[in-house]
Amino acid sequence: MDLSVFYLPTWRSGYGVTLTDYFVELVETVKLADRSGWTRALTTEHHFHYYGGAVPNPAVILSAWASATKNIRLGSAVSLMQLRNPLTVAEDYALLDQLSGGRCDMGVARGFVPHEFSTFHVDPAEAPERIEEGLEICKKFWAGGPFAHDGKYYSFDRIEPWPPTVNGAVPIWNAASNSRESFINAAERGYHLMMNQYPMSFESLAEKFGWYCDQWEKSGRKTQDRKAMVTLMAHLSNSEEKAIAEAKAALQEHAGTFLKVLQGLQWDREYESDISTLLKMCEDDDWRDVFSRRTLICTPEQAAERISKYLDLGFTEVAIIARYAGITHGQTVTTMQRITEEVLPILGIRTRKVG
């Protein structure tokens, strides 16, 4: 099993730390993941809102992480390339690949935030085609050698790609959530898969992951070449009750903000969300279902048990979101350390610690 740390940088002044210091703290935890032998460090792209808007270009912050680390891979989860010129995206990630010594990954997804599409004057219905055409350009750019392009959305005369990538390619991941088409297309094209557990039930996640796995096999690909990541919100403590008590307000705010931007309510600045936010995400009427069935907000022993379910499904990687809303740097470090020192041994997994 591979293990990653994933940051959706949700920052606002009410958290008691400046944005500059927040970024410094992120670097420190990425360095911790690197020393602890974790596989990947990930961040996402969002715009014009405190829900992720602190990182409008993942390649920039990933370059900062590259200079502070030695072994951990660095990737976007995701880059919203449908909102940008793909040549710029290709240049950004080629440069990141060089700065990191070939440790770069790039994720893509359709996107879900209405105000991002409207502000950049992009029709959400065009996103799949824009992404596919953009990735065609990126892959040619990263492979090296002059080329021109004349497509539906992008056209340019013959160019010489510069800078080159380290190995002639950047691994591509596809984040998918709802559309069956997204899962099928990712498998057909051989892209690795990213899924996020907390917005859906475990049963729904398993069904959708099955779409991807089935198509992967139908496309003639080998199972051992398939990589699939599940993202889980995490906060570990000595009892499940204590873990929930410590993380509940932060998860409610995170979930509430997610629902607001999804619904086009980005100007609603009521940060605190009540329990009804979590109830909207439950299959039953018990808000604890969100914690027990969709997160690692629990004890280390429970975390190991929950992770094993995803491994049994066929996931090859678990991405941990340990800092969200008001969760502090210290709490994040503790959770990451306990995952390395307590959860992984229960699962029989050893990491390659450095330094």
Image: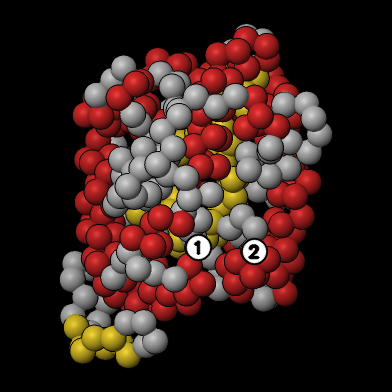
Disc number placed over residue 179 in the picture, else none: 2
Q: Quadrant of the C terminus?
A: top left
Amino acid type at mark 1: Arg
72, 93: nearer the viewer: 93
Which picture quadrant has residue 51? top left
Q: Picture coordinates of residue 86 (x, y %)? A: 31, 71
Q: Picture coordinates of residue 153 (x, y %)? A: 36, 82
Q: Residue at x 45, y 29 (%)?
A: 270
| Label 1 Cα crowd, 10 Å radius (few <14 / some 14-19 / many 20+) | many
What residue would you read off at disc 1?
110
Comes first in the chain, label 2 or label 1 = 1
| Label 2 Cα crowd, 10 Å radius (few <14 / some 14-19 / many 20+) | few
Q: Picture coordinates of residue 248 (x, y %)? A: 58, 20
59 over 184 or under it: above or below? above
Q: Which scheme is used to colour this image of the protein?
A: secondary structure
Question: Is disc 2 in contact with disc 1, using a CB cutoff of under 8 Å?
Answer: yes
Residue 119 is at least partly visible in this image: yes
Q: Picture coordinates of residue 227 (x, y %)? A: 58, 55
**Separation of marks 2 and 1 at Cα, in angstroms:** 10 Å
Amino acid type at mark 2: Ser
Disc number placed over residue 343 in the picture, else none: none
